Image (spheres, grey):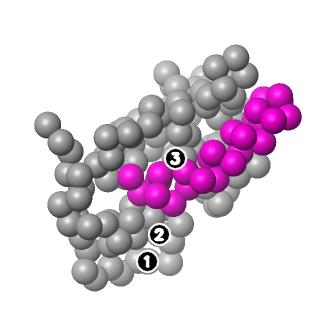
Amino acid sequence: MESMVFGFLSSLTVEPACEGTVRCRVKKCEERAIVGAPMSDDLPECLDCGACCFGDRPDYVPVRGDDYGRLGDAAEELTRWQGNRCFLRMAEGHCAALVLDAGLRRFVCSTYETRPDTCRVLARGSAECAGERFEKSARARDALTRVITRHEPLAP
């Protein structure tokens, strides 16, 4: 069964605090989407894409209480606090948990089993996924190419 992308938004009001977040980018992508356009048959595997792990804001991925607890020993290294709010740390424009498997030449989430809920709910092939790929797939590809060329893993 072919997946369909719907959700053309004729009017969108984005609150300033929303600007740049995953939800905001998805809505912008849906505004530009062709109503009823089928999802691409060449939808990449998550580990080949990594677009959702890239972001320009230091508060890109919120980490809540349960998330922090799930991260266990890695929590202190991978998160940063802004007042009383916690976020995954960003490094070189991507989540600090994103690493490169040099042998397979693909992205790997070092905290996949314990990742925050924000990451858990972003389903491959969803409208949110399409928004992330639309906005950031080139950035992810460029970063992966640079790392492969240098033969160095992405720095956390």
Q: Nearer the viewer, mark 1 or mark 3?
A: 3
Residue 25 lies in quadrant: bottom left
Classify the position of the C terminus by image quarter.
Answer: top right
- Image position of 71 with respect to 63: above or below: above
Instruction: Name the foreground residue: 20 vs 37.
Output: 37
**Which residue is denoted by mark 2 in the rendering?**
18
Taken as a whole, is the magenta stretch helix, strand or loop? Answer: helix
| Residue located farthest toward the front when viewing the structure as drawn | 41
Image location of residue 94, percent across then percent down: 66, 46
The disc, 1 or 3, on the residue closer to the chain's N-terminal end is 1
Tell me the magenta residue range.
130-156
Q: Amino acid at mark 3?
A: Cys
Residue 46 in sight from this viewpoint: yes
Q: Which residue is mark 1?
A: 15
The reply, left or right, for residue 149 in relation to residue 18 is right
**x 40%, y 48%: residue:** 129
Task: Give the residue at mark 3.
Answer: 52
